[in-house]
Image: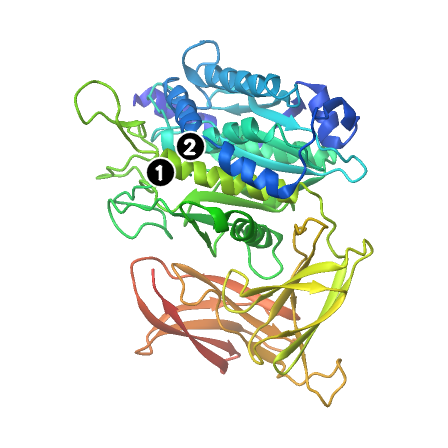
Amino acid sequence: MTTLLRVLTLLALPCYLSGQTNILSTNPVAEQIMLGNYNPADYAAGTAITDPGIIADGIAEGVSPDSLKSYIIRLSQFGTRNTGSDTISNTSGYGAARRWAFQQFQQFSAENEDRLVVSYLQFDQDICGMGRHANVIAVLPGADTSNPGVILIEGHMDSRCDVLCDVDCPAEGVEDNASGTALVLELARVMAKYTFAHTIVFCLTTGEEQGLYGAEAFGQYVQTKGIPLRAVLNNDVIGGVICGQTSSPPSCPGFNDVDSTSVRLFSALSFNSPHKQLARYIKLEYQENLLPTAAIPMTIRIMSPEDRTGRGGDHIPFRQKGYPAMRFTAANEHGDASNGPGYDDRQHTSDDILGVDTDGDTVVDSFFVQFNYLARNAVINGNAAAMIARAVPRPTDFTAYRTGSQLTVTITDPANLGVYRVALRSTANDWDTVFTLNGSTGLFPCNPTGALIVSVAGVDAQGIESLFSGEKLATNVSATHDKGSNTEPNIRLFQNRPNPFDEATWISFWVNEVPRYRKAWVQITDMQGKTVAQIPVEMHPGLNELLYTHGYGVRGAFAYTLFVDGQALDSREMIFAN
C-alpha cells in the first residue's frame, strides 16, 4: 500500500460523518410497492402458491448449492468489490459487480412472470473519494395491501483488504461477503414463484466495510418514507466452515476446526427485545418446519451480544431506528480482521479467495466456502422470511400470573384467531418451552421460583405463528392473595442468561420500587474471591439488565453480587464455558 493512498484514506474518513443524502429508488415502482401503493393483481402468479408447508418444502428443495457456487465464482472474478473501486469497467470493480447482480435479479424476474421489481437504492456520500453509491434491490410484492408490510433479506456485496479504501488490492471477499450476497441472490430466485401476504425485499448493500453506509442509507430511506418494515435478516460471513488462528469471539474453538452444522444468530439486547424475539422466531420456525425432514440437522445458536466482540454488521442501523433486526453468521470465521503483525488469516485480506488447487491442474478444487452449508443457511433464512410474510396478526396484549408452579396466561386478540403460542423463558437466550393454547386463557406448568419471562403469538388456520409479542415478567402471586399482591422482596437478583455462557451473558435484577441510594454495582468474582469486574448500574423500576462480556479462553465458575451503597443484596453463581 502506498503512503499516498494511506494519506488519502485518512483524509477521506472525516467526510463519512456527513451522512447520506439524495437517497432514492431509481425505479419509482419499487418504492410504491414497498409503501403498499399498488394493485397486487398486477404481480399475481398464474398459480398462486400460498400453502406454508409447500413453500417450506419448496425452499428446502429449491435452494441449490451449485447455484450458490456459480454466483460466488462470478463474484470472485470482479477482482475487488471495494466500495470505492472502479464503476466504469464491465469486468472488474464494484460497478461491474452491482450491474451483474442487477441483471441476475432481472433474470430471476423474467423466469417468474416478471414478479420481481428490480431497482437501485441510490445515495450520495463521500466514501473512499467517491460521491455516489447504490445498493441493489429486488422487490417481491405482497398479495395483501390492506395491511402492508416488508421483510428484508440482505447481505453486503462490497469487500476489502486491510486498508479501507485500497481499491487496488484484489479483495475477492469470498467468505466476507460473497457468501451472503450469493445467499440473497439464490433466495430471490427460489422465492419469486411463491405468493406471500407481505412484500419481501432482497437487498445487496454497499459501503458496509467502511461503516455500514449502505444499510444506513436504506434505514434512513425506510424511516423517512414510512415503509412498514417488519423484520431484517442480515447475512454476513455465512458460508465458511474453517476456524482461523484468530476469530472475533464468541466463535471458534481452535485453529482449523471445521463446523458445517451450526450457525450463529446475533441480535441486540435481551428482555423484551424485538431483535432477540426475531432470532428466537427464526429458530422455532426451523425446528418446526424444516428440522423433521432435514437430511443434515442444523444447530441454531442464539448469541447474547448484538455482534462479535468489537465487530458490527448491517443489522445495526436498522436496530438503531427501531426495526427488528438480526444477523446470521457462520459458526467459524477465518480471522478477526485485526490485520496486525503476524496476522495470517484470510478475512479482510487478498487471501479471502475461492480456495486452492490441490492437484496442480490450475483449477480450484478445495473451496473455503462450503456450498452445502451455505445452502442450509439460505433455507433457514427463506423459511423464516416466508412465515413472517404470511402476516399472521399478533395479539395486542396479554397477562401472565404465576401461582406456585402454575402459570395463568390470558390473551387479548381483536383478530380472534382462537389459537396461540405461549413462550416461556428463564435462564437461556432461547425459549425453554413453547406451548399451544386453544382459547384466550390457559394454565401451564412452570418453575415456581426464578425469573419467568413470557411472550405470545397468534396462529393462523395453517398453524403458522405471528412474530411473538414483547416479553413480560410473570407476576408472582400466592394462592391466598389477590393477583395484585406483591409477595416478593423489593429487589430480586435473577440467574444470568444464558448459563453456562460463552464470552457474554445477561445479568438481570427486578426492582419494585427504586430505593434512595448513592451507588449501585454488580461485582464479578472468581471462586477464590478475587474481583474480576465491577460494573456500575443505574436502577429503575422493573427489570434491569446488563451484558457482561467476560472475554474468551477461560473456563470456570464465577459469582456475581448486586451491591447497593456497599451492601451486598444477593449473589448467584455462573459458569463460563466457551
Can the viewer see residue 235? no
- Residue 437, percent from left and from top: 69, 64
Earlier sequence position, callout 2 versus callout 1: 2
The residue beneath circle 1 is: 240
What is the quadrant of residue 52 in the picture? top right
Identity of the residue drawn at 57% across and 75% down? 518
- Residue 69, percent from left and from top: 39, 26
Q: Nearer the viewer, residue 175 or 569?
A: 175
Circle 2 crowding by C-alpha within 10 Å: few under 14, some 14–19, many from 20: many
- Looking at the picture, does residue 473 appear above or below residue 302? below
The residue beneath circle 2 is: 179
Colour scheme: rainbow
- Residue 307, percent from left and from top: 46, 48
* Outermost residue, left side: 360
* Outermost residue, top side: 89
For the N terminus, the quadrant is top left
Q: CA distance from mark 2 to mark 1?
A: 8 Å
- Looking at the picture, does residue 248 appear above or below residue 148? below
Identity of the residue drawn at 29% across and 53% down? 253
Q: Nearer the viewer, residue 40 or 529?
A: 40
Dot 2 and dot 1 residues touching (CB under 8 Å): yes
Circle 1 crowding by C-alpha within 10 Å: few under 14, some 14–19, many from 20: many
Can the viewer see residue 423? yes
For the C terminus, the quadrant is bottom left
- Local secondary structure at mark 1: loop
- Looking at the picture, does residue 48 appear above or below residue 129? below
- Looking at the picture, does residue 301 appear above or below residue 412? above
- Residue 297, percent from left and from top: 42, 49
- Local secondary structure at mark 2: helix
